[in-house]
Amino acid sequence: MAGFRQRVPAPVDLAMVAHPSVTLLVDLSEGEGFAYHAHGRHGRGSVVIGLHPGAVRTGGRVGECLQIRLEPVAAAAVFGPSTGLSGTVASLDEVWGPDAGQAEDRLRAAASWDERFAIAVDILGRWLGTRPPVAPEVAHAWRRTLTGRGRVRVERLAEEVGWSRKRLSARFRSQLGIAPKHAARLVRFDHAAHLLAAGHTAAGVATESGYVDQSHLHREVKAFTGLTPTAVAVAPWLAIDDVAWPASWPVRKPPAVIAGTEPTA
């Protein structure tokens, strides 16, 4: 999770880059707050962004926002197995009901980001265990897809868990809300997007990420974000990933400022 604070008075307008996780954006602002736009739908306030949502833009006169990424297995444990978390953008109220407002009030009243992070962990922890767990075979298939950067074939995953491809695909989709093949595309795209952000050429990224050619990469980037590879390479969310989403919890949290937005990991 990460906290963002808008430090300039002008409205911001940012393209969200698809990520292999379910994303919660909790609006902690006063006034008009956070705005989002996806699939022709406009909304304000806290939002849940599912897997493979397509082109999503966020912004407005944001004061403070808490962003939480949940890997699909964890998201299923918090929200329940549901295809509704794939390809969708929904208000937090729609997903959590009255609990959403209570969570926002607790987080908004906190005196520091560290306190907010602790509250968020407590809130999510209360939901864990209240839903049926994801099958170990499905969890294994997801982990292998992630560690294999989307390049492990579905047939291989099925062999590893002792299921048929048809059974794995059906259970994977019903519990994580996305087909194994689409999950692999999303993970592969995420790897490619970060290579682009690191300054690699589109041709080199296509080869490194396992795309047929540069045109294939371009089509996938467009499908996941509505942007070109060039635009994805300079996306603010990717530029701060190493600060906002560390691989392990840091002893000292380094500050960073991107386009007037301050992420606090």
Image: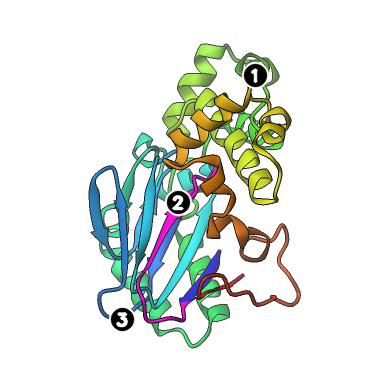
Q: Magenta segment range?
A: 6-22
Residue 56's mark?
A: none
Camera-nearest residue between 154 and 19 = 19
**In the rendered image, which quarter is residue 11 located in?**
bottom left
Q: Is residue 7 magenta?
A: yes
Mark 1 neighbour class, 10 Å CA radius: few under 14, some 14 to 19, many 20 or more:
few
Q: Is residue 220 magenta?
A: no
Residue with the mark numbered 2: 78
Q: Residue 51 location, x and y as percent?
A: 45, 41
- Quarter holding the N terminus? bottom right
Residue with the mark numbered 1: 153
- Disc 1 marks a residue whose amino acid type is Arg
Depth check, mark 3 against mark 2: the one in front is 3
Q: Earlier in the sequence, mark 3 or mark 1?
A: 3
**In the rendered image, which quarter is residue 97 located in?**
bottom left
Q: Is residue 262 above or below residue 160?
A: below
Q: Residue 263 location, x and y as percent?
A: 56, 71
Residue with the mark numbered 3: 30
| Residue beneath the point at 64% across and 50% down | 197
